Amino acid sequence: MNDNVKIKGMGYAAAQRRINNHDFTWLDTSDEWITSRTGINSRYVTETENTSDLALRAALSAIEDAKIDKHEIDTIIVATFTPDMQTPSVASILQAKLGLNDCPVMAFDLNSACTGFVMAFQTVSAFIQTGRTKTALIVGAETLSKVMNWNDRSTCVLFGDGAGAFICTQYASKESMAHFANSRGDLEDVLSAEGLQIQDISNARPLTGGTLKMQGQAVFRFAIDAISDGIRQVIEQSKWSLDEVDYIIPHQANMRIIAHVASKMKIPQEKFIINLERFGNTSAASIPIAMAEAKANGILKEGHRVIMVGFGAGLTWAASTAVL
Ligand SMILES: CC(C)(COP(=O)(O)OP(=O)(O)OC[C@H]1O[C@@H](n2cnc3c(N)ncnc32)[C@H](O)[C@@H]1OP(=O)(O)O)[C@@H](O)C(=O)NCCC(=O)NCCS
C-alpha cells in the first residue's frame, strides 16, 4: 500500500458579475470572433470581492463537501498571482476569514500563474506523504480583472475571476501518484504581468500595478505542447494507459488548444472536462473550478482516475494524477 492523497471535498465560487461576449460594447470585437477563436461565451468578473473572498466561498463549499470539521485543517495553500495584498498572503487572510486563528496552521501562497493549482496539489501531496500535513485546504483563486487592460481586445476577453478549492487528506491505496512539473524561465516575455517597480528613492513616484501582456500565438503553440507533455509524463509514471483514465482536466484557456491536443494525442474530446465557455480562463482557479463543478453535476465520481494538467506564465507546466 502507498501513502496516497484523497481529494475529500471540492468547492468553487464564481465572481458576481457575468460578462457575455456581446457586453464588450467598447471594444472592436464580436461574439462570433471570441467564440470561434476561443470557445468562450462568458466570464465572471468581481465587483466587490477580492481574491480572499472568492477563496473563502470556495473553501467553505469544499469543507461542506468533505464533511470535515474545519478545525481539522492544518495546512492552507493558495495558488494565485492576483493576491489581495503584497503581504500578508491570501492563505493567511483566508485562515482568519475561516475563523481558524487558534489552530496551528501552515499557511502560504504559491505563485506559478495558471499552473499554480497543480503545483499546490503536488506540494500538499508531498506534505501529506511525509506526514507533515494531515488535512489540507488548497485553493486556486484569482481576480484577474485587476491586472487586465480592459481596452486590449486580445487579452481582456479571455480571462475571468473565481476560485476553486480541495480538501486533501492522507489515505492508503494500491495506486501510486504521478507528478510532473517543468519550467522555462527564459520565456518570461511570452506571458507576464509586471510587479512593483524598483524605486528611485530620491525621486519617489506613485506606484503603479502591471497589466497582463501576452504573445497569443506563442502561448497557443506552447500550450498544446505543454498539455501533451504533461499527460504523457504522468501516464508513463503511473503505468496507466490513456484508456484507463476517466477524465483529463486541463487548464481552461481555449477550446481550440484542447481540441488540438485531443486530435494530436487521439484522445476523445469527451474525456476532457471543459467549462471555459462559461468561466473563461481563471488562471490558477480554472482546474479546481472545473473539477468541483463536474463533481457537483455528478460527472466526476468516487473512484475515477483523473489527470490534472496546467500551463501558464513562467513559462511553466505541470500534471498530476489522482484517484477520486
Ligand atoms: C489570443 C488568441 C485568441 C488570438 O487568436 P489568433 O487566431 O492567434 O489571432 P491573432 O493573434 O493572430 O490575431 C488576429 C487578428 O485578430 C485581432 N484580434 C485579437 N483579439 C481580438 C478580439 N477579441 N476581437 C476581434 N479581433 C481580435 C488581432 O488584433 C489581429 O488583427 P490584425 O490581423 O488586424 O492584426 C489566441 O492566440 C490564443 O488563444 N492564444 C492563447 C492565449 C492563452 O490561452 N493565454 C493564456 C494562457 S495561460
Image (tube, rainbow, N blue to C red):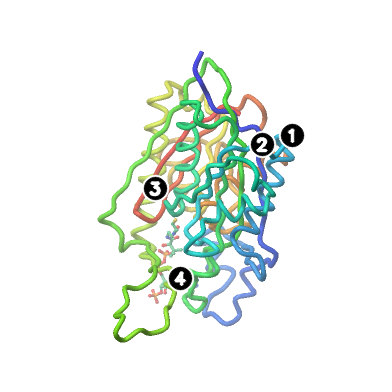
Q: Identity of the amino acid at label 4?
A: Ser
Q: Are marks 2 and 1 in contact (CB under 8 Å)?
A: yes
Residue matched to label 2: 9
Q: Are marks 1 and 3 in contact (CB under 8 Å)?
A: no
Q: Nearer the viewer, residue 17 or 69?
A: 69
Residue matched to label 1: 67
Q: Is residue 264 left or right of residue 78?
A: left
Q: Identity of the amino acid at label 2?
A: Gly
Residue matched to label 4: 154
Q: Identity of the amino acid at label 1?
A: Lys
Secondary structure of the residue carrying tag 1 is: loop
What is the crowding at mark 2: few (fewer than 14 residues within 10 Å), some, or many (at least 20)?
Answer: many
Task: Tell me the distance, in whole angstroms, between the alpha carbons under discs 1 and 3.
Answer: 37 Å
Task: Tell me the distance, in whole angstroms, between the alpha carbons under discs 1 and 4.
Answer: 42 Å
Q: Is residue 154 above or below residue 223?
A: below
Q: Are marks 4 and 3 in contact (CB under 8 Å)?
A: no
Q: Closer to the camera: disc 2 or disc 4?
A: 2
Q: Is mark 4 within 8 Å of ligand 1?
A: yes
Secondary structure of the residue carrying tag 2 is: strand
Q: Nearer the viewer, residue 86 or 150?
A: 86
Task: Tell me the distance, in whole angstroms, between the alpha carbons under discs 2 and 1.
Answer: 8 Å
Q: Is residue 141 above or below residue 30?
A: above
Q: Which label belongs to residue 224?
A: 3
